[in-house]
Image (cartoon, grey):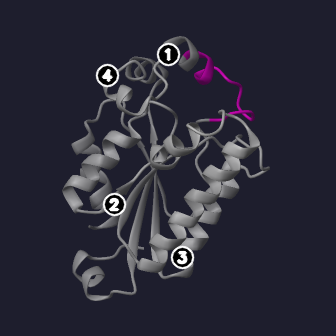
């Protein structure tokens, strides 16, 4: 599973995709951006596609979900064909099913399959944090940049949703999955752990 930085450079048919996933406000973008800075991996995050689509369609509509999924999967396919080392983010919920009928577990399996078919290795990093930390982070100033959820009351409702509906704690059903609780870790500390785990 581990691949050295040197051998990765020498074999152009191989490439890495690192996906930070987890609940809202867990720090996916912040950590992914730090990973991008340290490694030079290109950064592709949730809001690259979401912000385009939300200006055209209302949240929670079939049109929005269908277009978001299509754009994201098409982009991942092109990234895979080009064999680009990339870091991504995904707001994952094990119980979520979009208006198209595609569940989150099925979506990440599709992503995994697309990347592996072209010789890539995908690493899923499941970021978790305590409810107290999530509630504190959701109102942080850094979330304003991408018009992310900042309402503590809504976040409290999300955290309290029963398991099986929008389950934010169960990990994705994928091969290379690593869970990191970053309640007390800085983005740099998380990236250091990840780089050691995947040997880059």
Q: First in sequence: mark 4 or mark 3?
A: 3
Residue at label 3? 116
Mark 2 to mark 1 CA distance (whole Å): 34 Å
Task: Tell me the number on the disc at residue 151.
Answer: 1
Check residue 141 in the rendering and tell me which mark sits there, or answer none.
4
Q: Which of the pair 24/181 is nearer the observer?
A: 24
For numbered disc 3, what is the local secondary structure? helix
Front-most of residues 115 and 144 = 144
- Within-10-Å neighbours for mark 4: few <14, some 14–19, many 20+: few
Classify 10 Å Cα crowding around label 3: few (below 14), some (14-19), many (20 and above).
Answer: some
In whole angstroms, how far apart are the C-alphas of marks 2 and 4?
A: 30 Å
Q: Quadrant of the C terminus?
A: bottom left
Q: Compared to 52, does 120 lie above or below?
A: below
**Residue receiving disc 2:** 197
- Seen in the image, is 183 located left or right of residue 66? left
Q: Residue furthest right?
A: 101
| Tag 4 near tag 1, CB within 8 Å | no
Query: Which span is picked out in magenta?
Result: 156-167
Q: Position of residue 19 (x, y in %)?
A: 45, 55
Badge nearest the viewer, 3 or 1: 1
Element assignment for label 2 = helix
Q: x and y percent of residue 14 in the render?
A: 39, 82
Residue sitting nearer the eye, 21 or 52 = 52
How far is disc 4 from disc 1 in space, using C-alphas?
12 Å
Above or below, comparing residue 130 to residue 76 in the picture: above
Q: Left or right: 15 with respect to 149?
A: left
Q: Quadrant of residue 135?
A: top left
């Amino acid at each position: 599973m581990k691949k050295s930085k040197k051998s990765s450079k020498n074999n152009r048919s191989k490439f890495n995709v690192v996906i930070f996933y987890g609940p809202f406000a867990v720090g996916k973008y912040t950590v992914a951006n730090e990973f991008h800075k340290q490694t030079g991996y290109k950064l592709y995050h949730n809001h690259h596609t979401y912000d385009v689509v939300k200006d055209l369609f209302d949240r929670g509509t079939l049109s929005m979900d269908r277009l978001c999924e299509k754009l994201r999967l098409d982009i991942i396919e092109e990234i895979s064909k080009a064999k680009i080392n990339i870091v991504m983010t995904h707001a994952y919920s094990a119980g979520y099913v979009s208006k198209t009928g595609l569940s989150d577990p099925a979506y990440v399996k599709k992503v995994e399959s697309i990347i592996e078919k072209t010789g890539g290795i995908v690493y899923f990093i499941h970021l978790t944090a305590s409810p107290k930390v999530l509630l504190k982070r959701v109102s942080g100033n850094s979330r304003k940049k991408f018009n992310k959820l900042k309402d503590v009351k809504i976040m409290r409702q999300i955290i309290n949703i029963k398991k099986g509906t929008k389950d934010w704690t169960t990990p994705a059903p994928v091969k290379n999955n690593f869970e990191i609780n970053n309640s007390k870790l800085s983005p740099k500390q998380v990236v250091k752990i990840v780089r050691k785990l995947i040997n880059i």
